[in-house]
Amino acid sequence: MKLRLMIAVLPALALVACNKGTDSTVVAPTKSAAVAPAPAGTAWVDVVSATPEGGMRMGNPDAPIKLVEYGARTCPTCARFDVEGLPALKSGMITAGKVSYEFRDFPVHGPLDIGPILLGHCVEPAAFFPMLDDMMHNQETLLAKEQQVAEAGQALQGKPPTEVARYFAENLGYIDFVKQRGVPESKALACLADQAAIERLATNLQQADTQYKISGTPTFIINGKVVDGVLDWAGLERALKAAGA
């Protein structure tokens, strides 16, 4: 990605990119504990809720192993994990109640990400992960015109973040994309104009930088510890098993 048009509320994004790490950190095993069953008539993968950190969590909120991914909807490595790794994680460790999975949006490509993030949160909790999956699975198509749109968008420098978010979302096709998945256009436009949501995102980014020093996406965190250099399901599965999953 060549886009680096920064907006005032997200200055730290100039320093990060899709992860390319190679080293890995093994997380210490968690003590085994009895895992509660999912609520009657549901599976743990159906239990989704917002977190104070601005993420959305799937699974047993009391799972002994808490997995967090800082990911970007425009990051190819994140999309690959969503396609190749998340189904196995859902059908195995999350369904078993051993692991909860939280996705926290991290706009690694600055303004390019803001529209997709706002639209991705413009749905009910139950629809959050299906929308995220759809955006990841269709990432290449959605970003096909990224370079042209970004070059034309240079004229927006200094404009309000909401205007920039709408520009990229509209010209890359994200508004039509969410409309096709049940989000009315009026609601999509209202979400893109939500200055408070952008301010919350900026606050969450500052907290992430303070706590975890996020250097790229995806960044996986297991029980509060960053798992360095793990970018795919094979590496993450090893780390989760080493943590006791």
Image (spheres, rainbow, N blue to C red):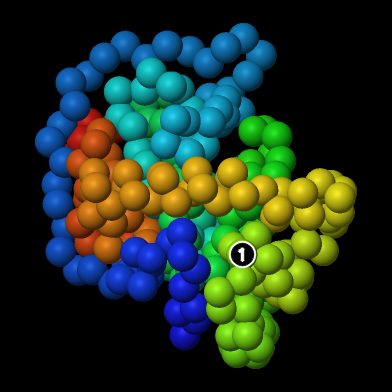
| Image vertical order of residue 233 relative to residue 176, above or below | above
Q: Nearer the viewer, residue 38 or 221?
A: 221
| Residue nearer the viewer, 209 or 19 | 209
Residue at left offset 43%, top offset 61%: 10
Residue at left offset 86%, top offset 54%: 185
Placement of 196 over or under 175, stated as above or below: above
Tell me the residue at 55%/64% (across/down).
113
| 187 lies left or right of 105 | right
Q: Residue at x 82, y 63 (%)?
A: 176
Helix or strand or loop: what does disc 1 sit on?
loop
Q: What amino acid is at disc 1?
A: Pro
Q: Position of residue 79 (x, y in %)?
A: 51, 63
Measuring from the top left, give residue 218's x and y in whole percent. 37, 59
Residue 67: give x, y in percent of width and height: 35, 38
Q: Is residue 56 above or below residue 10?
A: above
**Any part of residue 222 in sight:** yes
Q: Is residue 47 above or below residue 236?
A: above
Label 1 neighbourhood size at 10 Å, few (<14), some (14-19), many (20+)? some
Q: Is residue 51 left or right of residue 158?
A: left
Q: Please indicate whether residue 75 sits to the left or right of residue 242 in the image.
A: right
Number of marks in the rendered image: 1
**The quarter of the displayed image where residue 222 is located:** top left
Q: Is residue 29 left or right of residue 245?
A: left
> Quadrant of the image for the C terminus?
top left
- Residue 52 location, quadrant: top left
Tell me the residue that label 1 is attached to. 160
Q: Quadrant of residue 169?
A: bottom right
Q: Is residue 137 visible?
A: no
